[in-house]
Image (cartoon, rainbow, N blue to C red):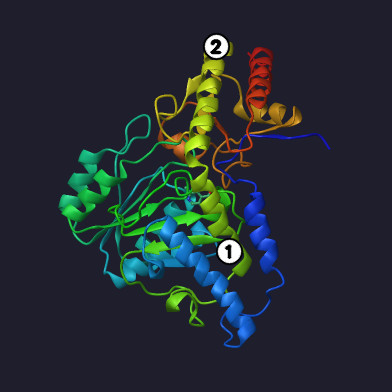
Amino acid sequence: MQKILYFDYIASTPICVEAKEALVKTLDMFANPSSTHRLGQKSRVVIETARNDIAEMLQCVPDNLIFTSGATEAINLGVISVCKKFGIQHIITSPLEHAAMLRTTEQTALQNNISLLHVKHNHIGQIDLNDLEQLLSAHSHALVCLMHANNEIGNLLPIKEVGKLCHKYQALFFCDMVQTVGKYPMSLSDLPVDFAVCSAHKFYGSKGCGLLYHKHNMAPLLLGGHQERNLRAGTENVGAIAAMSVALNMALKNYETEKQRIENLKNDCINLLKEKIPNICFVGNCVSGGLYNLINCYIPDVDTDVVFMQLDMAGIAISTGSACSSGTTTTSHVIQALGVPQKSMRISFGIPTQQQEIAYLIAQLEKIAKKNA
Ligand code: PLP
């Protein structure tokens, strides 16, 4: 089979060797972690050790972490139950959020007579903090749902400023941290966030495992057994939870060297794109900041779907939006909200990415740009 050069680490990452070992090790641990016999308790210990280790790495209280099947479930659980439990009257969010947040906030607002407000952003997708403050000052009992890093354009939210603003107006702050947990060291206790979510497959863990961090008491969404401190019923995914903890440990351990290396690759890629395709346009603020592993761009008047297909034929995997919207013919909601005139492509890098892969990508892109000009 043709070797595929992978540039879609924002959509998902390969499980790292250490996490895979942890996962495999638990496969024979079949006993239910809720069973009180000794085999069950062995599975329980794996879960609780992972919870304690993750809490130490993210600097928070273990009881404030709920394991879920991923970030989408964590967002649903968080938003729906927080709105009910805290009598939320207004949700303030942004059209640039991930579909999981957009759909959940829309439905929750609709079903609970909550007003849904959208904070303004500028042409490169930066959230307007003055507008946020105005919205907060005019609407009490609000839940603010804003992502730490945008998964399509890579913009970073000034999370401390946003959190402080929310608390100044007694609003709760719910942050989708899927694209930053595992990419940056952080202390959840020190950050002014009330709720946060992350997902293991974004930082070299396995799929089907995520976390909801909650600083305040919550109510469950899935009803049934007493798992996850009564907040998420259902037998836990023991292996994926163990793997998540190991993957996070590896990601944070390698942070200093990998961040610098990957950022250099990103900058090299940007410089080569500018040199070889002078009319290339960048989306968001990926050139001057943002996530260190993401570039969003398009070649004016060249159909991005054609670029995508030709790269695919050349053995290169990129994406044309978030993983849930790519594959469709429509332009992503983020790109539309920014008023970008055509579909764009997202190129993202990860720990396995090598310099020579960038050279091959650029050579192919240059060829496609010339052929389709
Ligand atoms: N939020 C963001 C920013 C994401 O990038 C993703 C995944 O693409 C999600 C939420 C959903 O995560 P999961 O795949 O764990 O449901």
The N terminus - image quarter: top right
Ligand 1 is within 8 Å of the C-beta of the residue at disc 1 = no
Q: What secondary structure is found at the residue carrying circle 2?
A: helix
User: In terms of sequence position, does the residue under pointer 1 or pointer 2 come before the other?
Assistant: 1
Residue drawn at x 56%, y 53% is 247
- Residue type pointed to by label 1: Ala
The C terminus - image quarter: top right
- The mark found on residue 134 in the picture is none
The crowding category of the residue bearing disc 2, from other C-alpha atoms within 10 Å (few below 14, some 14 to 19, many at least 20), is few
Give the residue number, with chain letter if any, for mark 1: 242
As drawn, 273 above or below 54: above
Number of marks in the rendered image = 2
Looking at the image, residue 365 sits to the left or right of residue 104; the answer is right
As drawn, 268 above or below 214: above
Q: What secondary structure is found at the residue carrying circle 1?
A: helix
**In the displayed image of the protein, which residue is found farthest to the bottom?**
37
- Residue type pointed to by label 2: Glu
Residue drawn at x 36%, y 65% is 61
Distance from disc 1 to disc 2, alpha carbons, whole Å, reads: 45 Å
Indicate the position of residue 305 as horizontal and vertical percent values: 64, 30
Quarter residue 21 falls in: bottom right
> Which residue is nearer to you in this view: 132 or 214?
214
Give the residue number, with chain letter if any, for mark 2: 275
> Which residue is nearer to you in this view: 31 or 236?
31
The crowding category of the residue bearing disc 1, from other C-alpha atoms within 10 Å (few below 14, some 14 to 19, many at least 20), is many
Looking at the image, residue 149 sits to the left or right of residue 251; the answer is left
